[in-house]
Amino acid sequence: MSHARRLGASLLLGALALAGCSQGTTGTAPVSSAPATQAAASPTAEVPPRFAAGGVRIALVRQLSSGDYFEQWLAGAQAEAKGLNVTLEVSSGDGNNDKQALNLEQAVQQKVDAIIVDHGFADTVQPAIKKAADANIPLVAFDVDPGTPKAVAISQDDHQIAELALGALRADTGGTGDAIYVYVAGFAPLDRRNEVWTQFKKDNPGIKEVAQIGVVNNSTASAVADQAKAALQANPGVKAIFAPYDEFAKGAAIAVKELGLQDQVKIYGADISTADIGVITEPGSPWVATATTDPSNVGRIAVRAAALLVAGEQVGPELKVPPALVTQKQLRDGGIANIEQLTAAIPALTTPDVARVPWAAS
Ligand code: SR1
């Protein structure tokens, strides 16, 4: 192992050790997540020749691309790729799982230097992921079960995302009241958040789920708005909506406002964007809390992890990005109107030590 690689590996091990002190895990494998504060750093290693020459190609194979979350995530991934002098070849299934699987097959055939699989259903992406693993193509899987330990699995801490949002819901409702839940099965992050909701209902019998709604497509927010409107009209006593995806929360907010129920019904969501901050902080908004990472930071981490693998560094096998709870009151009181102001107010949302690249400044 070269000096640069040894250094990179030791930095990663340091991050893993810190993470082990501060975060729970979902399994026995070591999980890297961010310490509370992380300083910007100068490069500590030489740029590997392949990166200096600009010949590294990383395929980003996405299931979904529309909506604030996925747009910000891509912007972060592209910015990191540019900084690392990597060509990022982006494809999207646009919600069509067969198309995503085909895109993945093509990336394997093209012998790219690494592949990032962003979301996807296990049964459609795992066959091609196995081919990539058999061909020794470095793999990063974000929000999808890759089905192989050869891939570095990245997720946000989805259990914590749900716990933070539901903690706010419980505090506001006093643990009693009718609730609407927005969920679509099959998406790994939503399934993990659903595990927490299932347990939450057992632990808080005063919270009654009176309706479950949900759809994920290219116009999720407006589809959820229609469903939420019908569910609210059928259940006039609802006090809370648990909508743990920002497109769900935006849709729920449209419904609540259209029905004039904003004084009665509050929304507890996930994710954030500058547009979401606008929705949360507008006068009379029912969306009162969201548990979130910075999506562009997560996209950056995925590209860094792939670059490290290309350079032969050890990563993972699992990286978990910790979220923070962001409340309407905090945004309004702090005069926070965009993501830049939010990340300045909550530095823990930026995690340069997760999959830090030793030859790059952060
Ligand atoms: C359809 S899955 C949507 C979720 O994926 C990411 O994990 C985001 O947090 C979003 O909530």
Image: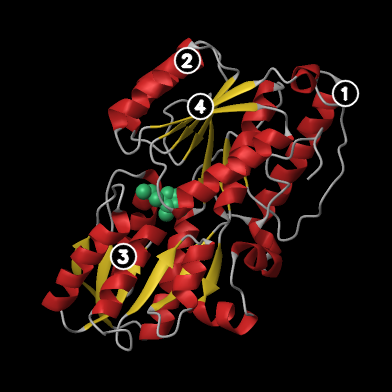
Using the image, tell me which numbered label, if any, was put on residue 3: 1
The Cα atoms of the two marked residues, 3 and 1, are separated by: 52 Å
Q: Residue at x 49, y 78 (%)?
A: 281
Front-lying residue, 164 or 118: 118
The Cα atoms of the two marked residues, 2 and 1, are separated by: 31 Å
Tag 4, which secondary structure?
loop
Q: Is 313 left, or right, of 210 in this rendering? A: right
Using the image, tell me which numbered label, if any, was put on residue 108: 2
Q: Residue 128: image x %, image y %?
A: 39, 19
**First in residue order: circle 3 vs circle 4:** 4
Using the image, tell me which numbered label, if any, was put on residue 149: 4
Front-lying residue, 362 or 26: 362
Circle 2 or circle 1, nearest the eye:
2
Q: Residue 318: image x %, image y %?
A: 56, 38
Q: Mark 3: which amino acid? A: Gly
Q: Mark 2: which amino acid? A: Val
**First in residue order: circle 2 vs circle 3:** 2
Tag 2, which secondary structure?
helix
Q: Mark 4: which amino acid? A: Pro
Q: Quadrant of residue 338?
A: bottom right
Q: Residue at x 29, y 83 (%)?
A: 176
Using the image, tell me which numbered label, if any, was put on residue 251: 3
